[in-house]
Image: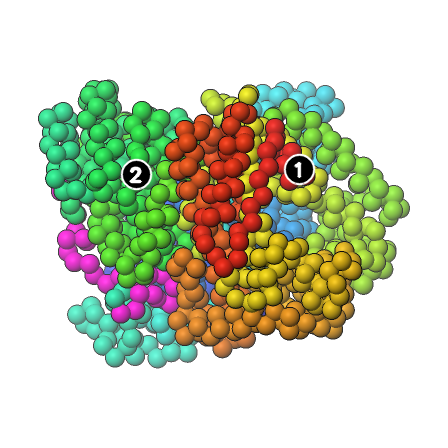
Amino acid sequence: MQDTLFLLDGYSLIYRSYFAFVRNPMRNPRGENSSAVFGFVRTLISIFREYEPHRFAVVMDSREPTFRHEKFPEYKANREAAPEDLHAQVPVIEQILSSLGIPIVQAERYEADDLIAALAQRCRTEGMPCRIISGDKDLLQLVHDPVHILRPGKSGLEELDRDGVYRDWQVWPEQILDYLALTGDSSDNVPGVKGIGAKTAAELLSQFETLQGIYDNLERIPSRSRREKLEAGRESAWLSRDLIQLAYDAPIPDDLDTFRLGRIDYAAAAPLLMEQGMRRQVEELGLDPGAYEPATNGERRSDVEDHSALDPALSPRDRTGRVTTASQGEALAGPGEYELVDTLEALDRWIDRARKAGVYAFDVETDSLDPLTAIPAGFSMAVEAGSGCYVPLRGPEGLVLPEEAVRERIGPLLSDDSLTLIGQNFKYDWQVLHQWGIPVPRVAFDTMIAAWLVDTSAGSYGMDRLAREYLGYETVSFSELFEESGEGGRGGGKGGKEKNHDFAQVPLDQAVRYAAEDADITYRLYTVLDKLLDLRGVRELFETIEMPLVPLLASMELEGIGLDVFALEEYSQELTSQIGRIEGEIHEMVGREFNIGSTKQLQEVLFKERKLQPVKKTKTGYSTDNSVLQELAREDPVPEKVLRYRMLTKLRSTYVDALPRMVNRRTGRIHTSFNQTGTATGRLSSTDPNLQNIPIREEEGRRIRNAFIPREGNIFISADYSQIELVILAHLSGDPALREAFTTGEDVHRRTASLIFGMEPGDISSEQRRIAKTINFGVMYGMSAFRLSNELGIPRKDADAFIQAYFGTYSGIRRFIDDTVARVEEEREVRTLLGRPRPIPDINNRNRTVKAGAERVAVNTPIQGTAADIVKKAMLALRARLQREGLKARLILQVHDELILECPREEENAVKAAAMETMSTAVRLSVPLRVSVESGERWGSMHQ
């Protein structure tokens, strides 16, 4: 199944494997429980044999609790802690996956379900079939061609499409969210509506379709008992829905080609399997177990290559592109010695030590993941590897040290930018300290960001993972800490350490062990990563762009942006009316009513009743995904209406109805979170909510953006780079024709059309310009003639002729592409103009499809990554200029190539001038950077 992305729910399979043998556990040669490893590997081999996947990823839960714990602290609190011998097997499984080159997807504060949802949505957008391997019923809401579930059963994997979901649950996939909101989910401690069971929930949704429909029509429910239960559980139902709602904006890789598999070298995993006693599985892989037999002293045989511990100085990347490290010495791997600082005199001594050392690690403990409301419980420090201290402000018995006295002492230390301040995901600490009244002007070293720059392919940069990978050290988990303190449950976390319960309730003798370890491990990671920055040649990027960006992003998040809730509520009603009208038009065109959301019923209408020619087939029939409907719309008006119906329903649920619920009660504003380490190209991503994906040009997107408003007396300023990626392509390629178009200020798309079609620019039609624009932007993404023909609706031979004419016109671009690919084939990585590296491990893959995908990434990354670098430099320069000129304007959003500022109305001209001058000179290229600056009372009033 070459064009299918398989997503394996990692922890679901790990738990299922472990408990399948709970009465009679599997044991490895050392006598340790290996049930999870055994079951996981056996299932993995079975999947690869049956489906022969070309794209595959194992998706793992965040090691720290998620944003759902902020909304509902009791979320999953009823679960017993996982057995220790299960936890011990997870690193083994990850090591096996790494040795096989199988990608692991994981992101802090997100469950695997969220990442799977985001990936499934990307597959739907790109028309790529997706198979989710999981028994989790929450994921049933994702089933919609081309996304299906492969559910584990007694006789193997059972594929569930839309009809399969309805058969088993009596509701459609799009109703699963509301169904579980009513019934609740005892396994996750999601309450639901008390007294509403599966049968009743299905009946209600069959009649009223949605949870909103049920509550809008309570008076129409004949049963008084049901009405009373629903009314009593109204708040619980909506809370449950919020908890079960998947985060489609979870941070995922930019390109689905990330998950293309190279040739699986099973021999690389054989030594690990033999260590677990899995001799039979090694034989099943066609290998000789004797060649991988562990030696009697516990070391592997010297004649078998060790794929798990490469010397970073000689070979800094393993099979997955992740940076590996050999032993860093006992000083970095052993436990530390930690001190409880419960007097001001002791605190003074530690502050003095930090000043004398000139470098120190710092970490804040709080009662919440939300920096807007978090209250410090204490903080930890380390000034050398292997030791640390914890300074409690509050403890189980109340106040430990006087806050004001502590603030007076610690404030000058943190504000002294002559010292090297180290943190892990310090953006959170910066925000908490800022809210507490301590400004931190400069963060010198964030280990999370350093690890990302050293290896952009790792995916997750939490402290627990970094400690394991770089130090060979297992940190104390927050769940263990709270079990020992009698609190139970799990918490939420920043930077890979779990923190959601009030840390002040942890007994001090246990708190010091956990908190001081945070600072100690952060310091130890600094000693390793600081050297790797030089080894990878990214120190300048780290010190001049990424680290200065931390406080800027932190302040932008705290600032937030205003939202006109009433405007969105009004628009929601309009959309509901539009959706209903389109639904009626579709039914009238077809001649009968049917469920537009049902793939089976839509197939019946399009291919049997309207006799349209199918484009592609799936296991359950002919595909009706968006790419298919776009093609069918050329022949029939119904598919176009269905596309419109889908777009409006998604817009309403994803933004119009969701955004008002995300307004912070205290500030009255929306506070998005910017992820600095979420992409391999260096682009920032935005979550909770994702404000970067709101459509910009369509009227519907403009209406949503129109709901974003400044404070009274303020206006918005938008400063946007125009065609920045084409500008960068002109610079990197050196093509004289493309450079001239930008240098003279011509319409570059009209100029391209003029050269391709051999006509004067003034004679170019809008259709010819559209063709040129599509090629201009498509060439950097490796657009083929096949794709161009589909996008433009033209014959493939014409598309091929246009591409050939394009490269004939811009021969410098052809050379740039060929030279880039040749260089990456040799170096196995590519860099942006400012030196940001990205490994391209599949560039020499023998599979032509895999290699082609790697080549596209190799060509696009220097362009898109350089654009990201330029935007970041512009942000920093603009912030500095605003401060120099004493302006009150503040950066509040970054949306790819656009910066949004909020400023007093009287500063409009000064801020516009500052933005134009600063952004256009952020980086000197051989062609000028074009900047467009606008102002408006609302976000949507700009870019008209």
Q: Earlier in the sequence, mark 1 or mark 2?
A: 2
- Would residue 719 be visible to someone looking at this image? yes
- Give above or below for 445 relative to 124: above
Label 1, label 2: how many angstroms apart (C-alpha)?
A: 37 Å
The stretch in magenta equals 314-338
Disc 1 to disc 2: CB gap under 8 Å: no
Q: Which mark is residue 442?
A: 2
Q: Is any atom of residue 128 visible in this view?
A: no
- Report the predominant secondary structure element of the magenta stretch: loop
Residue in view at x 57 percent, y 40 percent: 933
228 and 176: which is toward the camera: 176
Q: How is the image coloured?
A: rainbow
Q: Quadrant of residue 807?
A: bottom right
Which of the image's four quarters has the C terminus? top right
> In the rendering, at what x and y percent does residue 350 appear?
13, 34
Q: Residues within 10 Å of mark 2 (few under 14, many from 20)?
A: many
**Looking at the figure, which quarter contains the N terminus?**
bottom right
In what element is the residue under mark 2?
Answer: loop
* Nearer-the-camera pick, 227 or 592: 592
Mark 1, residue position: 702
Q: Residue at x 55, y 62 (%)?
A: 730
| Label placed on residue 393 | none
What is the x, y in percent for residue 580?
Answer: 78, 36
Q: How many marks?
A: 2
Please state which amino acid type lies under the numbered disc 1. Arg
* Point 52% across, 66% down: residue: 734
Q: Is residue 785 left or right of residue 926?
A: right
| Position of residue 66 measured from the top left corner of the image (x, y, whole percent) | 43, 39
Residue at the (47%, 61%) spot, across then down: 862
Q: Residues within 10 Å of mark 1 (few under 14, many from 20)?
A: many
Q: Is residue 577 magenta?
A: no
